[in-house]
Each structure stands twice: as structure tokens, then as C-alpha cells.
Amino acid sequence: MMMSTTGPPAQVSPHFPVTPPDPELASKTPARHAACIIIGDEILNGKTLDTNSNHLAGLLFRSGISLDKIEIVPDVETEIVECVRRLSQPETRFDLIFTSGGIGPTHDDITYQSLAKVWDPKGELEYDPETISRMNTHLAKRQPTSNLNPDQEKARKRMALFPKLDSQVLFVVPHLWVPVVNLKKKLFILPGVPTLFTQLVDALVTNYIPLPPTDEKQHRQFVSTTLPESSIAPCLSRLASELAPAGIKIGSYPNFGTGQVTVSIIGPDSIQLSKVALELEEEFSKLLKL
């Protein structure tokens, strides 16, 4: 008799309704500038490699939003509050601020309680019943609430204890109970776990953020060469100066492993970028023949 090698069926995550996007989103003023705050001692002491800011940078670039600043702060309330207040000042011009990290059930997860004090001197928090309901449903098979002692249940509910003033709870991914908490329609609070962060921020930016029109989005092209960076530096400097008025940026990035230098060309006009790339290839070809 043939023995089955299949294990028990994989548990399927429950699906929840998402928060309906604003029907007038397309008519709202587009977000064009953003900042990111990575919160966590584990990033600063080297235990964990931050990949969330890199993912966010790529997502926003493709969406036409410029990520102008990334800051990393420890799990210290005063540091978190100061950073958000500073980046929220009108002169910074940030339309959006994203935070990552510090929203779990343990004592060092202090992001919600810290951010509650940015605009509210009392720092009032309140439990969100819908988040608690979704959390309990999602965790029912793994660890039902009935199996928790009072301290464990209180720790779990900390993940649903949100700032009260000017807050909105957004459920953006149907198979995740974790929401994105939005303060002042500007600050978006996300978890630090990369698998959660990427899913949530992808859905958030795609469906809930007013994006610039397509013709404002930046494009990027690359040209690689085996020439030393010092050999192409004069050419790059000349082109960078000439193209700056057209909003085109040129960057140079050597790879000591491959011995190649990759030149990045970023700008609003993809056709013009192709012309610049061709010009660079011709310049590099001439230099190789010298």
C-alpha cells in the first residue's frame, strides 16, 4: 500500500474586509515628498538589517514620490517624539511620514504610546475593538484568547492600543489583521517585520495615497563600463552640469567585485534619458580606445 507523504493541510489565514479607499482620492492634492523613520535598537546595534527603508524607497520612486529623508532612532520615547515633531514642521515640506517598528506586545514596543504624544500633550491611547477582533480571529487556532493568562492577554492587546487624537485605523490587506494607523492624515505607523511592512505599505501607497500624475514620475536608466571611475569623472561632471536644469541627475557607483562602474541616469523624460544613455555609451567607447 502506498503511504501518503503529504502533511496536514496548511492553515489558511482568515480574510477580512479592507477599509474602502477614498472615492475622491484621484482629485486630492498628490503627495510628492516623504520621510521614513526606522525605529528600533536592533537596527542601531547591528542585530537586524533594515530592508524596509530600501523597499519603501523603491516603491515611492516608482509611484512618483520622492523619499527625501531616512532616519533611524532607538526605542526611546523622547527620541521618537522629537524626530516626528521635527520632520512634521511645515518647512520640511514632507507630505507623508512613514514609521517602521516598535508596535509589538513587549515592553520595548513603544511606538504607539510615543507617537500619541507628538500632537497630544496627554498622549491618550484607546483600544481599537475591530483590531482586537481581527487579531483574536487570526490567532484563534495558534493561541486562542481562552488560553492566555491576564498578563498575556494584556500584552497581546497592546498591539491594538492606538493614539486617540486625529487617528484613523486603515485595514489595507485582506489576509492581515494588522492595520496601518494614520495620524493627522500624514503619519503612517507600520510594523517592523519586513513581510508585514512590505505588504502593508504596498497596499497603502497603491490604494490610499494620492499619487502624482504619470507624467511627473521619474524614470531611471543605467549604463555600465569597465573604465575606472576617475577616467569617466570629467565626462559625468560635464553632463551633470548641463542636464541639471532639465531635472536629470547622474550618479556613479563602482563595484569592486566586478570591476565595473554603473552610471545611473534619473529624470522625468524617458526619451531624453535614452539619448543621454546613448551619449554616455559613445563617450565611454571613445575613452576605451585611448
Image (cartoon, rainbow, N blue to C red):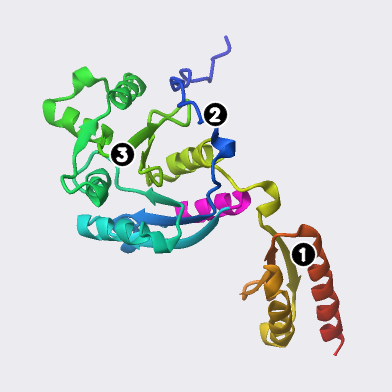
Residue 252: image tag:
none
The number of discs equals: 3
Residue 273: image tag:
1
Q: Quadrant of the N terminus?
A: top right
Q: Tag 1 or tag 2, which sits nearer the N-term?
A: 2
Q: CA distance from mark 2 to mark 1?
A: 35 Å
Q: Which residue is mark 2?
A: 23
Q: SS class of the residue under badge 1?
A: helix
Q: Which residue is mark 3?
A: 166
Q: Tag 1 or tag 3, which sits nearer the N-term?
A: 3
Front in this rendered view, residue 67 or 76: 67
Magenta residue span: 52-64
Q: Amino acid at mark 2?
A: Pro
Q: Is residue 59 magenta?
A: yes
Q: Amino acid at mark 3?
A: Asp
Q: Quadrant of residue 272?
A: bottom right
x and y percent of residue 17 in the render? 46, 21
Disc 2: CA contacts within 10 A as few (<14), some (14-19) or many (>=20) = few
Q: Amino acid at mark 1?
A: Leu
Query: Which label lies toward us, 3 or 1?
Result: 3
Q: Quadrant of the C terminus?
A: bottom right
Q: SS class of the residue under badge 2?
A: loop
Q: Is residue 20 magenta?
A: no
| Residue at x 71% of width, y 87% of height | 234
